[in-house]
Amino acid sequence: MWFTNRNDEGIIYHKYFNPIPTEVVALVLTAIECCIDEWAQGLKEDIKFTSATYGSVYKGHLASLQRFQQHTAPYKLLEKICDNLHDTARLPCWCPAT
């Protein structure tokens, strides 16, 4: 989506994606939670991924990530995770990290 090829946003606007922002990690976690919710009853049910439905879930994930960052600040774990996510995301387009 953002790093599939050299013309995608993550490559063109690399200064906004390097490292992957915490807000993007929270958004991806929220999307994953929506996907899990769609299968909660054992059969896929379409659930709209909207701010009205998942805004509070996003805020919860973002707050958790911020607490994680505070508690692990001496080790810079979240920073390292976001750097690694960025570098790994660039692999499919064969674009070296800048």
Image (cartoon, grey):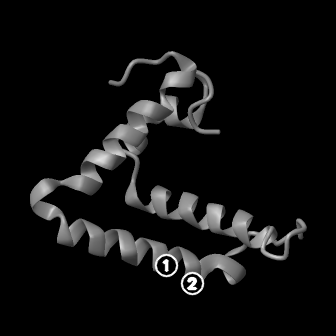
Residue at horizontal 49 percent and vertical 78 percent from the top: 59
Answer with left or right where residue 61 lies relative to residue 4. Answer: left
Q: Which mark is residue 43?
A: none
Answer with left or right where residue 38 lies relative to residue 51. Answer: right
* Identity, as a three-letter code, of the amino acid under mark 1: Lys
Name the residue furthest front: 42
Q: Which residue is mark 2?
A: 56
Answer with left or right where residue 45 lies relative to residue 21. Answer: right
For the N terminus, the image quarter is top right
Residue 35 location, quadrant: bottom right
The one nearer the camera, 1 or 80, is 80
Question: Is the C-beta separation of discs 1 and 2 under 8 Å?
Answer: yes
* Identity, as a three-letter code, of the amino acid under mark 2: Ser
Mark 1 neighbour density, 10 Å: few (under 14) some (14–19) many (20 or more): some
Kind of element beneath mark 1:
helix
Kind of element beneath mark 2:
helix
Residue 63 position in % (x across, y down):
38, 77
- Residue 57 in the image: above or below residue 97: below
Residue at horizontal 60 percent and vertical 79 percent from the top: 55
Residue at horizontal 23 percent and vertical 54 percent from the top: 77
- Residue 14 in the image: above or below residue 27: above
Residue 20 position in % (x across, y down):
40, 47
Residue 85 location, quadrant: top left
Residue at horizontal 31 percent and vertical 71 percent from the top: 66
Residue 53 location, quadrant: bottom right
For the C terminus, the image quarter is top left
Residue 44 position in % (x across, y down):
88, 65
Q: Which residue is mark 1?
A: 59
